[in-house]
Image (cartoon, rainbow, N blue to C red):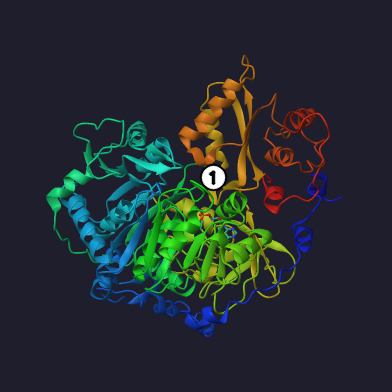
Amino acid sequence: MSDKEKEGLDVSEAQIAVHWQEEEYFPPSSQFIAQANMTDSTIYDRMSLDNFPECFKEYADMLDWYQYWHTTLDTSDAPCWKWFVGGKINASYNCVDRHLKKYKNKAALIFVPEPEEEPHLPITYQELYVRVNEMAALLQDFCGLKAGDRVTIHMPMTPELPVTMLACARLGVIHSVVFAGFSGRACGERISDSTSRLLITMDAYYRSGSLLEHKDKADEAVRVADEEGHTVEKVLVWQRYPGKYSSKTPLVEGRDFIVNDLLKQYHGKRIDPVPMPAEAPLFLMYTSGTTGRPKGCQHGTGGYLAYVTATSKYVQDIHPEDVYWCMADIGWITGHSYIVYGPLSLAATSVLFEGVPTYPDAGRAWRIAERLDVNIFHTAPTTIRMLRKAGPDEPQKYNYHFKHMTTVGEPIEPEVWRWYYHVVGKGEAAIVDTWWQTETGGFLCTTVPALQPMKPGSAGPAAPGIHPVIYDDEGNEVPAGSNKAGNICIRNPWPGGFQTIWGDRNRYVSTYYARYCKNPESKDWRDWPYLPGDAAMQAKDGYFRILGRIDDVINVAGHRLGTKELESACLAVPEIAEAAVVPRVDEVKGRVPDIYVSLKPGYSASKEIEKKVENAIAETIGKIAKPKHVFIVPDMPKTRSGKIMRRVLAAVSNNMNVGDVTTLANPEVVEQVRKMVQGDAPVAVQQDGPEDLKRFGQE
Ligand code: WTA
């Protein structure tokens, strides 16, 4: 027996992989191909490594530049890559102004409020132009903002959010949007990390039938930032219903201001877009890692915009005449790249939906699609599973037709994929399964829909210009078709990739590049493969299948939550001595956190303590991280060196084989915990659980 087997890892990654059956191909329809933006398969030759990096000129040429660049890729500060150096550009100009000549009277955004009795609100490119200019004037004159300043935006899915983002971009101000569902504390930490002088929020918004208080989170955020030694100068509050303040939280004199009132002074004001260096930061987007604070992923202007524009055009097949609906939230990277910047840069009509897709009933999403005649649809497996569970036959009751659908955020089960294809897409839509990350700005693996057939459960081959490789732990290449999994890496930089972690270049290098770097002194990009942190395997046909994270990050409903962040939230409860968070399989959300805590001496387990832990998570991280269970255990299973065995807890939560635990410091605890979680009667143990769970918590 090898050491690995002794520890209970009795199935190797290779063995897991061969259990998979290959899925059949689904070709795109001839109607789809006939109208597609990209039907020329020589794009892969054009974007081969031989033509790198100049091949990305094709992407940058989709944009309007004030000044053309002189250097396509500058590697002098490797691995902080600089794209299109010497170029001057403005993102707001490219998403708004440049469309006025042809499309000023066409809807840029259509806002769909959650209450069904409220009318849809189309905002034309002209109207967007006016609003963005007035907001930019306010930010410049009233708030004194200038290029390079940071602003934190904690706003729900309303048109005022993209207006605010584009107003920042117009001035070269760096926006940091925090998902509205995150708590005031999470927002406050992100404010202080980015040292934003300004917080922009909204008073309230609709979610599942009620108008939620939101402004109270701003007060908490400012307080938390203060605790961390950072003072927020002003809080700007948009009104969900203009002219009416919908929050119960009072405004703080001299600090809080109603945007809708202030804007009256800027009526008709125009602000020239500031020509920004291509490599100037456009925004920060915080994301979770295994340990420590969330990382502020810094995205540049020219490279990012070129990459999301081109992938929106080729992969999402967006034409200006399309009605495109991405159901993600703008507070995540998907919303930034594929609700706001990509689609608007292409002059599309982008639908913005405030609410949850199953409220008031499972037909809501399809009624919206029918009424707006949406023809491109974009969502995540967690939402697809939710819609399928709530109303498996609903789509056929509505007369809509999608030509194209996207899935993003987590691996999609082939069975769920087939429902998406046959029922939601009515067998007519081409599907792309897009694999990428906050850090990567845009798609890494996906089919180009008119060029390759779909294969359920596979993200497809690499996107044009992206050159992945799978390495084993020793850095050897794992070949396609070998039925072995490994760590997927990207060999080359690409324009959409983030530039650094805000204020922490060392962490950027150590997290994403150190593992397979061939020479840390090198200025040659070939020495710096990018490590996304996912395990994957590549089939003979070149399609990649993503298996999940290689670090301890839990993917809840397509969103990454750091186990360490959740655990430190639990430890803030005074009674808690130790905490361990593990993923539990959930039919709808994919994974949800299960929480194990042990108590300090002198306390005994109670419902009240469980509740305190739940509340601590909701307050620190947000409701999205709500645990499925809180188990108060007598002790944590530990190694002799005192490390909590999260792997064992994950096995218990998911009725998987806990393996050999005799080498633990306290093996008897495992059985006590098992009984507590699974009950007294023995539960059928799954020998072969999902790959990410097998890998979870393994050193
Ligand atoms: C996972 C979301 C399988 C993956 C855009 C990645 C996926 C993490 C897919 C990034 C997909 C994303 N198939 N897994 N199509 N898309 N993932 O930063 O583990 O919120 O590393 O970006 O989600 O999550 P993030």
Q: Residues within 10 Å of mark 1 (few under 14, many from 20)?
A: many
- Residue, disc 1: 561
Q: Is residue 291 above or below residue 381?
A: above
Horizontal side, residue 692 vs residue 424: left or right:
right
Query: Can residue 532 be seen here?
Result: no
Q: Identify which residue, 351 or 329, lies in the foreground.
A: 351
Query: Can residue 37 be seen here?
Result: yes
The location of residue 347, given as percent across then percent down, is 34, 70
The location of residue 626, given as percent across then percent down, is 55, 37
Ligand 1 within 8 angstroms of badge 1 C-beta: no
Q: Quadrant of ligand 1?
A: bottom right
Quarter where residue 228 is shown: top left
Question: Tag 1's secondary structure?
Answer: strand
Horizontal side, residue 470 vs residue 464: left or right:
right
Residue found at the very far top of the displayed protein: 602
Residue for point 36% across, 76% down: 62
Horizontal side, residue 407 vs residue 145: left or right:
right
The location of residue 61, given as percent across then percent down, is 35, 78
Q: Identify which residue, 612 or 535, lies in the foreground.
A: 612
Residue for point 70% across, 23% down: 634
Residue found at the very far right of the displayed protein: 1
Quarter where residue 213 is shown: top left
Quarter where residue 381 is shown: bottom right
Residue for point 26% across, 30% down: 250
Amino acid on which the number 1 mark rests in the picture? Leu
The location of residue 681, given as percent across then percent down, is 83, 31
